[in-house]
Image (cartoon, rainbow, N blue to C red):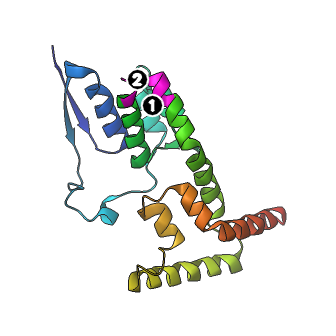
Amino acid sequence: MVKKVVIVGAGPSGLLLAHYLLRRRDKYQIDIYERRSDPRIVSFSTSRTFPISLNERGMNALSNIDGLEEAVKAISLSVTGGVFLSKKWQVTLFALLDEHSDNLAEALTQFTLRRKEDGHALVELGNNTFPLAKGLFIEFLIRELVAKTLHKLLPNRFVPSLSDLIFESSVPYSEILNSYKGWISKVKKSNKKFLTSL
């Protein structure tokens, strides 16, 4: 007998739940309702929210589905009680599940290996992109403004700003970190000095 399930909200939790249930073959009929417009017809930057994460409420909901909470925690980078799971990594996980015939243990092992470098880069970017010292923060704002302006005027000659690369692009975090390693190093030293002076 097919069970009918209605999911309200097409965010990470709703989509992950739908995917989980649909992978159980023909046992579920899923309807998803979302208040925002269809992302296929709305400009990408106006339809995306940041960060894509699950808070405590989302994790509690997942805990009611046998095995799903553990699977999400295993593939997610924990950040202050929530978890990040970008669309890119969701696609990677789903492809690995297909590749390994729904063998979750093997898919998660491979997923973890592929995600490790980007996970470390995301932590580094998250901790060291925004300076705490006033002078360096002003420099950051100026850098952002100049980069956004130049990229808008000459997109083939100038890369997007650091914040646009992190939040608006699909560039792997490890590549972003490598491109901005000088800035990240400068902020890291400045923030350490700032925090020790408190």
Q: Is residue 173 above or below residue 67?
A: below
- Residue type (three-letter) at the residue carrying disc 2: Asn
23 drawn magenta: no
Q: Main secondary structure of the magenta part?
A: helix
Q: Is residue 27 left or right of residue 117?
A: left
What residue appears at the point 46 percent right and 44 percent down from the top-left corner? 85
Label 1, secondary structure: give it.
Answer: helix
- Residue located farthest toward the right when viewing the structure as drawn: 197
- Residue located farthest toward the top when viewing the structure as drawn: 1
- Residue located farthest toward the left when viewing the structure as drawn: 1
What residue appears at the point 57 percent right and 83 percent down from the top-left corner? 142
Mark 2 neighbour class, 10 Å CA radius: few under 14, some 14 to 19, many 20 or more: few
The image's mark for residue 174 is none
Label 2, secondary structure: give it.
Answer: loop
What residue appears at the point 46 percent right and 29 percent down from the top-left corner? 107
Question: Are dots 1 and 2 in contact, CB under 8 Å?
Answer: yes
Is 156 in front, or is 134? 156
* CA–CA distance in space, label 1 to label 2: 7 Å
The image's mark for residue 60 is 1
In this figure, which residue is indicated by the disc labeled 2?
64
Horizontal and vertical percent position of residue 90: 40, 41
Which range of residues does the magenta coloring cover? 99-108
- Residue type (three-letter) at the residue carrying disc 1: Asn
Horizontal and vertical percent position of residue 20: 33, 28
Determine if residue 123 is in view: yes
Question: Which part of the image, by quadrant, shows the N terminus?
Answer: top left
Is 70 in front, or is 175? 175
Q: Is residue 51 above or below residue 68?
A: below
Question: Which part of the image, by quadrant, shows the C terminus?
Answer: bottom right
Horizontal and vertical percent position of residue 137: 64, 76
Q: Is residue 132 above or below residue 40?
A: below
Indicate the quadrant where residue 156 lies: bottom left
